[in-house]
Image (tube, rainbow, N blue to C red):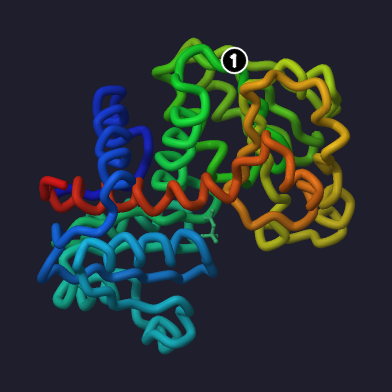
Amino acid sequence: MHSLVTIADLGKEKILSLLASAARFEAMPNRKTLDGRVVATLFFEPSTRTRLSFETAANRLGARVIGFSDAATSSSSKGESLKDTIMMVSNYADIIVMRHHLEGAARYASEVSPVPIINAGDGANQHPSQTMLDLYSIMKTQGTLDGLDICLVGDLKYGRTVHSLIMAMRHFHPRFHFVAPTELAMPNEYKLYCREHGIDFTEHTEFDETLINAADIIYMTRVQRERFTDLMEYERVKNVYVLRADMLRHTRPNLRILHPLPRVGEIAYDVDDCPQAYYFQQAKNGLFVRQALICDCLEIEG
Ligand code: CP
């Protein structure tokens, strides 16, 4: 059995095999594959999609689910350490899905835990299960992962989903277009990562129709209020890019708009009715991908 801490741990063959497994779960999501198993979901940070889709994934495979969605209701609010929490929960569960505000928390948990850990987001660092569902969504809508023009838009500094996506796409020759205000530009470490892995990228501060019309995927992100220490800075940049339906008149026919969600204004509601909108289906895909990931980490055949 093994943990999933970072997308960087997954090679190309492994990614493709997990995507194929997710497709099989999509064809038949209700099975008794995890009958008798217990899945723990420990969410030290808020979540709707990630927690509920992991829990649905487990339930639909016959597992039982324990955990908390608010750390204030757990003994960590009394000062219990992360290590002790993990050791306790591993007494009860076969696998732990954990979201934590501290970068590196999932790696640490995986080092002390006797059962597999799935990183459901650690601070601004990584969100590998989101990345796998993003890849699944790209594969489903484009028919390939290879050679695509992908615009990443919004908060590229704190956005863990875009960081993970860049790493995953290193196998598939993408052309990335990073669109962010200067304050939220892609951190140097990820630009260095691109250069080291031969990933083509350009940087922009304007989000205009030239970029939109040449894209296969537009990946919008939320400016995350919770990551800012200076709320004045948040106010300055929060509405910097808003995608509206009228901006989608001359796109490539295969363009799909992704967003890890939640959105808070960066995609206008009129986009929801456009054929390019794919973010709700993208979130649904998370269920099948997470079924594949739980089974893979437990080394159980789907
Ligand atoms: N995409 C995502 O992580 O959403 P939640 O924060 O609702 O889990």
Along the viewing direction, whichever of 170 and 88 lies nearer the viewer: 170
Residue 70 as seen in the image, left or right of residue 248 = left
* Label 1: element kind: strand
Residue 250 rendering spot, x and y as whole percentages? 81, 21
Residue 7 rendering spot, x and y as whole percentages? 37, 37
Q: Residue at x 84, y 23 (%)?
A: 209
Give above or below for 67 relative to 77. Answer: above
Residue where numbered disc 1 is placed? 175
Give above or below for 126 relative to 46. Answer: above
Q: For residue 195, say whether it is visible.
A: no
Snapshot quadrant of residue 99:
bottom left
Residue 263 as seen in the image, left or right of residue 71 = right
**Number of numbered discs visible in the structure rendering:** 1
Snapshot quadrant of residue 177:
top right
Q: For residue 66, say whether it is visible.
A: yes
Q: Residue at x 69, y 16 (%)?
A: 202
Q: Residue at x 37, y 86 (%)?
A: 75
Residue 291 as seen in the image, left or right of residue 166 = left
- Assess disc 1: are there few (<14), some (14-19) or many (≥20) residues with their C-alpha within 10 Å of its C-alpha: some
Q: Residue at x 65, y 36 (%)?
A: 257
Residue 48 rendering spot, x and y as whole percentages? 53, 66
Along the viewing direction, whichever of 87 and 40 lies nearer the viewer: 40
Amino acid at circle 1: Arg
Residue 54 as seen in the image, left or right of residue 122 = left
